[in-house]
Image (spheres, grey):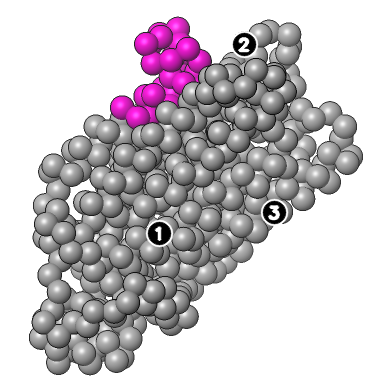
Amino acid sequence: MVGIQFTWTVELSYGTPYLLSLELSKELIALVWLAGPLSGLIVQPLVGAWSDKYTSRLGRRRPFIIGNGVIVCLSLLVVAHSKDMAARLVLDPDLERKVAIAIAVTAFYILDFSLNAVQASCRSLILDAFPISQQDTANAFASNTQNVTNVFGYFIGYLDLVKYVPILGDTQMEAFCTAGVLVFICAMAVTCFTTKEVPYQKAQNEESRPWYHMFVHIWNAFRRLPSAVQKLCNVQFFAWMGWFPFLFYSTTWVSDIYFETHERDDPDSWEKGTRAGSFALLLYAIVAVIGGTVLPTLTANGIISLKNTYTLSHIIFAASMLSTLFVHSVAGATLVLSLLGISFACTHWIPFALIGEYLIIDTNAIDQGSKPNYGTLSSSSSEALVEGGDQKKNPEFDVGLVLGVHNMYVVFPQFAVSIISAIIFAISDSFYSDPSSSVGVTWVLRFGGLMAVIAAVLSRKVVDVKTK
């Protein structure tokens, strides 16, 4: 998870500013970031369902982590050197810029697809490895590991890497991407060599199905999502309608405010403005570490429930995003982003903890011959599990598939937000002729705040689990 989160940090903190430096418009950048939801929609359910039944001596998840991890590293290097590659391919300056954009955008798409595959495998691995009593703790630890990685990543992004570590690259983007490759390789190696995974063994009466049945299986799971998981997914849909604008435009928002309050004649103004955004995200990541440490302790001791914590996180997010109406300084913007660390810690912990608990509780109930408590398995599957002996290990909707379908509710709103963002930018540009104006970005963030209000309301319907 460390390598995955560090790579997301590289993309989220420097991706949009980097594309802007290539003179790509904000409207087109909004469409470029369809790579995230598109890859999540296609890759995570497929990898989840495929890896659930994948037979390899390396295990179910490890082959997907290794194969796609190699592609992640290559994609990062291509992104970092897209300008140099374009300069070597063409001589015309205008054509060179267009080729650099094409290379960078293509590399970002490949990066998102491969990174989503690795993430789906790692998330499934957590649910495979830990029992019900440890799901909350395991997911909280994984979330906090990501938070600590964010601190490290945003701190690295804030530093002038060209000055302090020139061996990494000639520009800040090259150095940051190279650092991302090194971190990812180390993290992937630790996971693959230390995690014990039992290879999947097909049951004697398990039918071999054609490859296209996987798509049918995913569609069936999406249509008949269990009630408890469905309620959680409804919240996730609107929550990520808010998170997507933040993830891709928060750094740009801080940078725009920096440019509005500082002279642009400085040749290093782009990197200084981007580092100002990275510093804000650094503080946000530090708050996320604190929240990710304190909040799980409170929920584990029964001081506050997961459900109430989840609702509070959406309220904080909504209030912070709507406060952009009044924030016009770098210091104020930094404070707003810092508060969102609390919401971030909850978003990457609570939904996965709840899903893990739903699945394991129902599997245990079926193993004991009783009815599932949360409906994560269908009635027909339940009967088969009770009567089928070895089939107990093969429920109709396995861990990887359920997580993949859950992720579809995370990525669906991102398609809408990408289009809505482009529309908001187009309307903003029609009223404000200055292309450097931050008005469009702030309205995209406010839209995200309104979506978080809906998520907070729906979160009151989420099923809370008593594991004690």
- Categorize mark 3 by other alpha carbons within 10 Å: few (<14), some (14-19), many (20+): some
Q: Residues within 10 Å of mark 2 (few under 14, many from 20)?
A: few
142 to the left or right of 280: left
Task: Name the disc covering residue 268, or none.
Answer: 2
Secondary element type, mark 1: helix
Q: Looking at the picture, tell me which residue is in the foreground, 64 or 27.
A: 64
- Residue 91: mark: none
Q: Is residue 182 above or below residue 408?
A: above
**Label of residue 419 in the image:** 3
In this picture, is 39 found above or below 221?
Answer: above
- Identify the residue under disc 1: 44
Quarter holding the N terminus is top left
Q: Is residue 389 above or below residue 441?
A: below
Circle 2: residue type: Asp
Residue 306 showing in the rendered view: no
- Ranked by sequence position, the earlier of labels 3 and 1 is 1
Tell me the chief SS of the magenta region. helix
How far across and how far down the image is residue 195, in percent?
A: 14, 48
N-term mark: 2 or 1: 1
What residue is rendered at 70% in x and 48% in y? 421
Q: Tell me where the magenta segment starts and ends, as one range.
A: 153-182
In magenta stretch: residue 273 = no
Question: Label 2, label 3: how many angstroms apart (C-alpha)?
Answer: 32 Å
Where residue 263 sits: x, y (%)? 73, 11
Across and down, in percent, residue 410 comes to 50, 59
